[in-house]
Image (cartoon, rainbow, N blue to C red):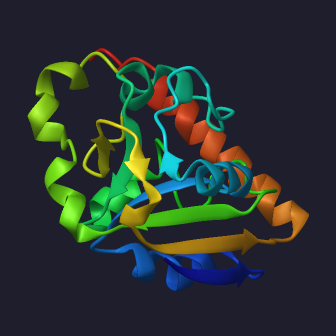
Amino acid sequence: MKVINIKITNSEKELENKVLPLLLNHVFHVTTYSAYKNILKDKFIKPNKNELYKFNHPQSQISLGVKNNYICLVDLRKTTDLAISNSFEKFNFLHPIWSDELTVFMILTPNIYKNIIIQKQIKEKLNKEFYVPKIESWYPIKLSIKYIEKTIIVKIQLEREIKSICDAVYMRKLEKSREPPKQS
């Protein structure tokens, strides 16, 4: 497994310019560095239904993946810039709110793509659970690290003031996404 280390010190734009191109056209699991160390020790990415790993997002407990004992993945194989941009309102996979810790992107090998559950396969569940439209997919069982092609470890060291603003904007967007639609 190839490991790439990246340090971001300037801005969110730097993060998008350096990291996003490495993720496009791939499927990956995003996690914290401490969870990544446990994954390496276990030799598997495991579903997080029983909070095996600490939940890192407010929406984790209500997510379709967690509730169905799946591994949550970000799928950028056939997506548009607009879909990626819109996804940040529900889950900013590039700059998660645990950003005081390293962010790890574990890119899967294409030979297991056939086992990935995509949204159109489980349409009946999409109305009942939290998920990220257009970019989220799932793996139905624990996933051996031998199927990780590349790992990207990102250290985000933005100035405190910038980080606080980014986190506040993200949390506001997340809260808005949970509000029921306004009646006309």
Question: Residue 117 at what x, y percent from top left?
Answer: 20, 41
In-front residue for pair 86/74: 74
In-front residue for pair 17/33: 33
Q: Residue at x 36, y 63 (%)?
A: 147
Quadrant placement of the C terminus? top left
In-front residue for pair 87/136: 136
Question: Residue 15 at what x, y percent from top left?
Answer: 60, 76
The correct choice, above or below, for 74 with respect to 77 in the image is above
Q: Residue at x 10, y 35 (%)?
A: 121
Q: Residue at x 81, y 56 (%)?
A: 100
Question: Residue 75 at what x, y percent from top left?
Answer: 30, 57
Residue extending furthest toward the right: 160
Total labels: the figure holds: 0
In-front residue for pair 18/182: 18
* Residue 8 sits in quarter: bottom right
Q: Residue at x 36, y 26 (%)?
A: 64
Residue 12 visible in the shown view: no
Describe residue 52's horizontal placement relative to residue 44 as left or right.
Answer: right
Describe residue 119's horizontal placement relative to residue 151 as left or right.
Answer: left
Describe residue 72's horizontal placement relative to residue 7 as left or right.
Answer: left
Question: Residue 12 at what x, y percent from top left?
Answer: 63, 72
The correct choice, above or below, for 65 with respect to 158 in the image is above
* Residue 55 sits in quarter: top right
Residue 85 visible in the shown view: yes
